[in-house]
Every structure is written in structure tokens, then in C-alpha cells.
Image: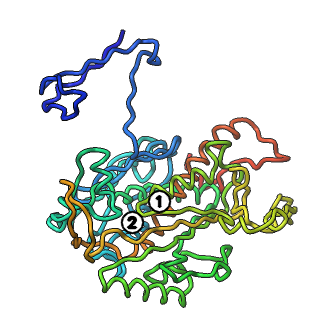
Amino acid sequence: MASLSSKPFLTGFASPLYSDLPSSFSLHFSLHRRLLPNNKLQVRASGSSYGNHFRVTTYGESHGGGVGCVIDGCPPRIPLSESDMQFDLDRRRPGQSRITTPRKETDTCKIFSGVSQGLTTGTPIHVFVPNTDQRGNDYSEMSIAYRPSHADATYDMKYGVRSVQGGGRSSARETIGRVASGAVAKKILKNFSGTEILAYVSQVHNIVLPEDIIDNDALTLDQIESNIVRCPDPEYAEKMISAIDAVRVKGDSVGGVVTCIVRNCPRGLGSPVFDKLEAELAKACMSLPATKGFQFGSGFAGTFLTGSEHNDEFYIDEHGKVRTRTNRSGGIQGGISNGEIINMRIAFKPTSTISRKQFTVTREKEETELIARGRHDPCVVPRAVPMVESMVALVLVDQLMAQYAQCNLFPVNTDLQESLLPRLEPKEVLF
């Protein structure tokens, strides 16, 4: 028999199930060895890690000492510095314009391990970003009353305790670790297969960018970054900015949609049946704060079409490759990438913390009114753009490594498959 004992609990249970227990007691569990593989008991902390081959764990809270991530499984000998991450961190940081939270953070990152002489070593990469502009007193009311539609109540329901200042782990500052690691993933994908991941704002409140305005083949990062709302069309960008300004001055908020495309994605990524590529993308993107919906390809609009209208017919291009004439599948068929542009849309709700009076309840279960203080985005989607890109990159690099390990271990069937080889010139290879 194997045993697992806890430390004594110092307070008693209020439940009648434990009314006969003393106020201080110990729990003792007995487990048969045959139930434990290799005679070991493994407990994995849940919720803060993503990936199997390229695995990222984020840590830290909004008003703690700092936030960051640990990247495990990064290939060695990749040139990497803080500047590779800082570009996307600057796109994510608060205080960058009047339509974002006024919190002032430089979000300057520091790599503490996993990189030597400018190259990744293959060991865990630790990235840290300090918090420097905390205002814990802004959250005194929220320590008592729950913000409607925020995670305050559910964190209490789950853990029985929570970090009040800044929302703790439910704060968007947690995404710093995702963006830093996503920058590494994007660099790997770009260097290996020329893969590009671009996201942009396609809707703010009731201002919707028509799909046929954007040419996904020609879209550039400069177009996206040309305005503070990150919409690549200048006319619609101004309308979106005005919509955010209109609610910002009233202490209210609006939601929106971020569209993301992936160009030059290797074919064959994704695995049937539970690890389909679109399922992994949906999980990753929906793990971002404030997300409420995910669509890829034709999405829900495809339900209005017949099969003959929706099917993407195949043809052979001038290079002898199998292509599709249309792309209603969104670059994924049967849960596996087909080489076409992957496109998806992620819906974000209006920011829940607003400075308008709302009815709520306290932790003591008393009804009350709340006018939230603090510094919050009137619309999260402009800053969500690099977050979405990062989560998509983390999915793709993890799937790329899985595909390489399983299906490229031996010579591929060149009649049907494409060999996964890095697009580096011989003189550029670092080994």
C-alpha cells in the first residue's frame, strides 16, 4: 500500500457532513500501488500551460511583482533576444493610445535563461516583465462587491479566495507571457516555412468591416499598424475609433471581432479526431480574456449554403500542387491544414469593468450598487490583435513539431506529401 497524508487543517468545516470532526484534524489516504503507474503519484497544476512539444507556462498577476512565462521545448540554435519579443509586447502594452487603458507600463522583458550568446540552448526559456504602475487602492470596492460579468465571483466560487487588485490571473496582463512566447513561435514558423500570421480588427460594436475589402494575399503588418485601432482600412478605422470614443467618455465599453489569417502554413498540421487543427485553434483563442465566439472559414454563414455551393473544388496549379479554387474551408479540411490561407474570427465582449453604476452583490451575499474604479480598456480588440496572433502561433508551432516527429521521421511519400524542411539557405544553417 502507498499512502498520501495531508497537513492538519487548522479550521473546522461548517458542513454538517463534518460536524463530528474536531477543529484540527488530519486526512490520511491509502492507495493501492497497482493504481499508480511506476509507483508514482503525479499531480499536474491545471490551467496555466499550453502545448505538448512547444510548451508554454505563464505566471504572475496584474498587481504582483511581475508577469512572464517559461517556454519548454524550444529548438536549440535559434537566434533570439529580448528585442524579438519586445516588438509584439509593445503592440500589446497598455497606455499606447486614448482608446486603451491609461495604465502606464513599459512592459520591458528580460530573458533569464534558455539563451546563451544570442542563441537558444534547447533548455527552458524564462521571460520576466515587471509590473511598475500598480494602483491597488482602485480596487477597494471590488474587494467587497463583484463586478458584473467579471471573473470576481467565479474565482471565489472555485477557490474560495482571490487576488482582488487588478483581477489577479483574470487580468489581461497575464497575456504578456503568451505574447512573449508567441513571438518566439512566430520566429520559428517564419524561419522554417515562411509562415506569416496577421490579425486585425474587423469589427467594433456595430461597425463591421466588409470581408471583400481586405485582400488576404496582399495584407501587410504596416497596414494593420497604421492606426490605433489596428483596422487595415483607413475609412473603417476612423469609424471604429469614433465608436470607441463615444462610449469611453460615458464610462462604458464595447466589444468587437479580431480576424486572423495564416499564410504559408505547412500542409498536414493537425490530427484526427480530438486534436483537429481548428479545435486546437479554437481552444487557444478562446482561452484569451473576454472571448465569446470563434469561427473559421465560412463559419456560421456556411450553414445557409448547399453542399454544391460550399464545397471548395480542387485543381492543380502551375507548380503541380493540389489547390482549391475557393477557400470556404478556411485552410483546414478534416482537421488538417491543406496549404490554403487559414482564416478565423474571434469575438470579444465589451470590457466588464466600467465606471457606470451597476447592480450587484457583495461577498456577504448582500445586494448593492457598484461604480468601478481603475484603468480599463473601453474596447479590448485593438490590444487583442497581438494576443490572437500569439495564440495562433503557439498552436501552429506545437502542431508543426508534432507533424515533424510523427510523419517526417522516415522518408515521406513524395507523391502525396510535402517534406517538412526548413527554408534556410545552406549558409544560414546554424549547425
Residue drawn at x 28%, y 64% as measured from the top left: 147
Q: Can you identify the residue that label 1 sits on?
A: 183
| Horizontal arrangement in the rendering, residue 97 relative to residue 163 (left or right) | right
Q: Quadrant of the N terminus?
A: top left
Position of residue 126 relative to residue 305, above or below, is above
Question: In the rendering, which numbered label is found on residue 210?
Answer: none
Front-most of residues 63 and 129: 63
Depicted 401 relative to depicted 97: above or below: above
| Residue 410 seen by the camera | yes
Judge by depth and name the residue closer to the eye, 80 or 44. 44
Quarter residue 299 falls in: bottom right
Quarter of the C terminus within the rendering: top right
Ranked by sequence position, the earlier of labels 2 and 1 is: 2
Residue 345 locus on image (x, y percent): 57, 67
Q: Amino acid at mark 1?
A: Ala
- Please name the residue shown 39% across and 68% down the image: 92
User: Residue 89, which numbered label?
Assistant: 2
At x 40% / y 49%, what residue is drawn? 115
Of residues 293 and 422, the one nearer the viewer is 293
x and y, in percent, of residue 192 in the image: 61, 54
Q: Residues within 10 Å of mark 2 (few under 14, many from 20)?
A: many
Please state the horizontal and vertical placement of residue 406, each as a whole percent of the image: 66, 37
Separation of disc 2 and disc 1 at Cα? Answer: 9 Å
Q: How many neighbours does mark 1 have within 10 angstroms: few (below 14), some (14-19), or many (20 or more)?
A: many
Give SS at disc 2. helix
Horizontal side, residue 172 vs residue 314: left or right: left
Q: Quick check: marks 2 and 1 in contact, CB under 8 Å?
A: yes
Q: In terms of secondary structure, where does tag 1 sit?
A: helix
